Image: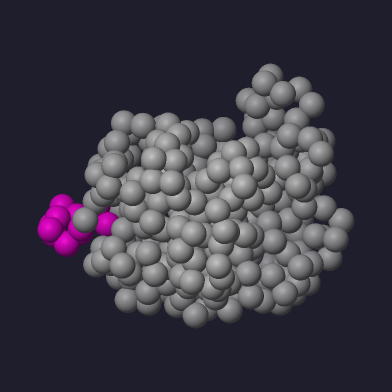
Amino acid sequence: MFANNKPYRDFADYLATRFPYKVQKISVNAGFTCPNRDGSKGRGGCTYCNNQSFSPGYGTPVKTITAQLADGVHFFSHKYPDMKYLAYFQSYTNTYDTLPSLIEKYEEALAYPGVAGLIVGTRPDCMPGALLDYFEALSRKTFVLIEYGVESTLNRSLERVNRQHSYEESAAMIRTTAARGIPVGAHLILGLPGESKEEILHHADRLSALPLTTLKLHQLQIIRHTALAREYQQLPDSFHLFERDEYIDLCICFAERLHPDIHIERFTSQSPKRLLIAPDWGLKNHEMAARIIKRFREKGTWQGRLCGCLDVPHPALF
């Protein structure tokens, strides 16, 4: 059922169906801001957000998009000289600008030698119809994946972390984008303050009903210089930060309830040590992924086994 003898549908498997060669994402910081920072929706951003915690060192807004791609290609090409690249517009809200300015940025990235497509991260409330028209037309010519920050399916959690949008907006925009024939991804944080284990697992049930191509999961992390860090310092008992093995088991239970057609791009996120307050598991993302796969096999289970939307058989390769 799943390629690479894995007990879940991996993002690499999806890319292998779309490209006859190896591809690598290169993160681009195109100098965007966010409606939750500039006052059009809110101030200060999401309480957990410090953009430095997920922006690679080679991506910096003081460089042009072309220069950042050149740095990224130089960084990765020594491993695989024939590799192609996906320009990943990652930092902040990458559809939050005028249409001409956005198109100019995307086209600059696509014009760089070896770039085979775009991945664009954004908010579900920042995708105007005219921009969807552009992405729909572009997706007929090249690879396009739109990633929406969903973060939770509980509106009370979204309010608590100051997301300034609802889950219903996320679900509606995912459906609208997928209806245009554009692959859609979602981001989800496991363990936001106040969410019980059953509520966290119910996120999998709700997302399984959406036309998602990919899903990124990561644990709640307390990052320095954020509103959440101040809240954690003042009210530590209102947080449940998972121990490493506890989180591994949570990922297994979550994946069991997730639709088996959704490709899981990651289970964890790894913030720089200089910014991370907690939890610090001392493992890289690939080391955590290996432990999660090992735990899947120890439990004899697989993605979608308990998905309520369909009867999922035991994968042939598992």
Report if residue 296 lies within the magenta region. Answer: no
The correct choice, above or below, for 125 with respect to 295 in the image is below
Looking at the image, which residue is at 54% across and 73% down? 309
Judged from this view, the residue extending furthest toward the top is: 78
Describe residue 269's horizontal placement relative to residue 129 as left or right: left
Report if residue 235 lies within the magenta region: yes
Question: Which sits in the foreground, 167 or 265?
Answer: 265
The quadrant holding residue 22 is top right
Q: Report x, y in % for residue 85.
A: 73, 38
Q: Quadrant of the C terminus?
A: top right
The residue drawn where x is 31% and y is 31% is: 282
User: What secondary structure is the magenta-colored segment mainly?
Assistant: helix
Q: Position of residue 195 (x, y in %)?
A: 28, 67
Task: Tell whether 255 sits left or right of 176.
Answer: left
* Residue 93 in view (yes/no): no
Which residue reaches farthest right?
Answer: 141
Q: Which residues are magenta?
A: 227-239
Which of the pair 289/259 is nearer the observer?
Answer: 259
Image x and y of residue 107, in percent:
79, 52
310 sits to left or right of 167:
right
Q: Identify the residue at horizontal 45%, vertical 50% (top origin).
A: 301
Instruction: Report which quarter residue 4 is drawn in.
Output: top right
Q: Return the residue nearer the eye: 123 or 67.
A: 123
Q: Is residue 141 above or below residue 290?
A: below
**Which coloring applies here?**
one colour
> Could you tell me which residue is drawn at 76 percent across and 22 percent down?
81
Counting the numbered discs, the total is 0
Residue 284's image quarter?
top left
Pick the residue in front: 18 or 220.
18
Counting from the top left corner in percent of width and height, residue 75 is at 63, 25
- Residue 286 in view in this figure: yes
